[in-house]
């Protein structure tokens, strides 16, 4: 619901001040635009969509076995998704109500949260791996480097070196069999689960990233 609502907000391009549509009509228009946009994106980025679907299917199978989805990044960092069916308790006092939440690891796994969160979380873990690989290489070169998510910074005179470094690290990272390694780890840990096959690879020549001027801003 939150994901869908966010899409509607992003696609609500009609100026409310004009009052061309009432709230109900605006919601229908936004829903239509959101569905159409997602459909077009799925056609333009078919390989990415197939990978997202595959990741979601794997997460669903794991969580249905009452296990949290976990994986190890290419830098050997273990990650475990914490999503469970939270247990809430309401404590009423004379002046207010207080909501207490039990976040115990003994609570049942939330299959829906595990499934929907895994694709973006896995991609974010790869993004952070790329950032750390770049930071390590910049440090090895004795250069200043800092970053926030996918925004990389250094001194102005070192930007060309950073641009070359981050592209080389990206190529190094994604030249690895990332999905194959992920599936292998799943099959070792969850031997009773029959996982779907990995989607077919696309035809992108990854080496082209090294010469792509607008690959990273």
Image: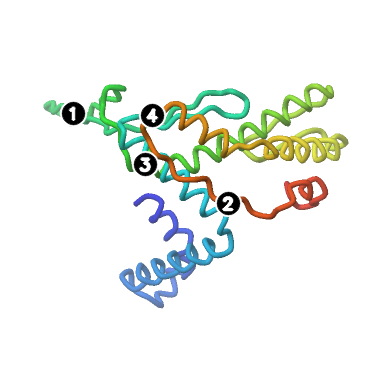
Classify residue 43 as left or right of residue 203: left
Q: Nearer the viewer, residue 174 or 169?
A: 174
Nearest the camera: 31 or 153? 31
> Mark 4 — residue?
82
**Horizontal side, residue 27 vs residue 205: left or right:** left
How many residues crowd mark 1 within 10 Å: few (<14), some (14–19), many (20+)? few
Q: Residue tagged by mark 1?
A: 89
Are the residues tagged 3 and 2 within 8 Å (C-beta)? no
Residue at the extreme bottom of the image, as rendered: 20
Please name whichever residue, 75 or 4, is drawn nearer the observer in this view of the structure: 75
Q: Is residue 37 above or below residue 176?
A: below
Position of residue 129 measured from the top left corner of the image (x, y, whole percent): 63, 31
Question: What residue sits 78% from the left and 23% below the top?
Answer: 139
Mark 2 touches mark 1? (CB < 8 Å): no
The secondary structure type at the circle numbered 3 is helix
Tell which circle, 3 or 2, labels the residue nearer the N-terminal end.
3
- How far is disc 4 from disc 3 in space, using C-alphas? 14 Å
Q: In the rendered view, would you say 176 is above or below 79?
A: below
Q: Which of the two labelled residues, at mark 2 and mark 1, occupies the earlier sequence position? A: 1
The x, y position of residue 105, in whole percent, is 31, 22
Nearest to N terminus: mark 2 or mark 4 = 4
Residue contact between numbered discs 3 and 1, judged by CB atoms under 8 Å: no
Residue 55 percent across, percent down from the top left = 47, 43
Of discs 2 and 4, which sits in the foreground? 2
In front: label 3 or label 2: 2
- Mark 3–mark 1 distance (CA, rounded to whole Å): 28 Å
The residue pinned by badge 2 equals: 200
Q: Is residue 78 visible?
A: yes
Q: Secondary structure at mark 1?
A: strand
């Amino acid at each position: 619901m939150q994901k869908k609502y966010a899409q509607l907000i992003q696609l609500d391009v009609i100026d409310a001040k004009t009052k061309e549509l009432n709230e109900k009509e605006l919601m229908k228009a936004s829903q239509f635009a959101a569905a159409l946009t997602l459909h077009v994106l799925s056609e333009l980025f078919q390989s990415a969509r197939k990978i997202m679907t595959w990741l979601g299917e794997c997460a669903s199978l794991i969580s249905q076995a009452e296990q949290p989805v976990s994986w190890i990044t290419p830098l050997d960092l273990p990650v475990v998704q914490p999503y469970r069916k939270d247990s809430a308790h309401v404590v009423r006092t004379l002046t207010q109500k207080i909501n207490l939440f039990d976040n115990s690891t003994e609570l049942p796994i939330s299959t829906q949260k595990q499934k929907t969160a895994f694709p973006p979380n896995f991609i974010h873990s790869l993004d952070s791996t790329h950032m750390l690989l770049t930071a390590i290489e910049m440090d090895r070169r004795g250069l200043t480097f800092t970053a926030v998510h996918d925004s990389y910074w250094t001194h102005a005179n070192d930007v060309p070196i950073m641009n070359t470094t981050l592209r080389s690290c990206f190529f190094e990272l994604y030249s690895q069999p990332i999905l194959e390694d992920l599936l292998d780890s799943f099959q070792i840990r969850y031997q009773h689960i029959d996982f779907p096959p990995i989607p077919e690879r696309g035809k992108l020549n990854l080496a082209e990233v090294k010469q792509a001027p607008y690959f990273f801003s």
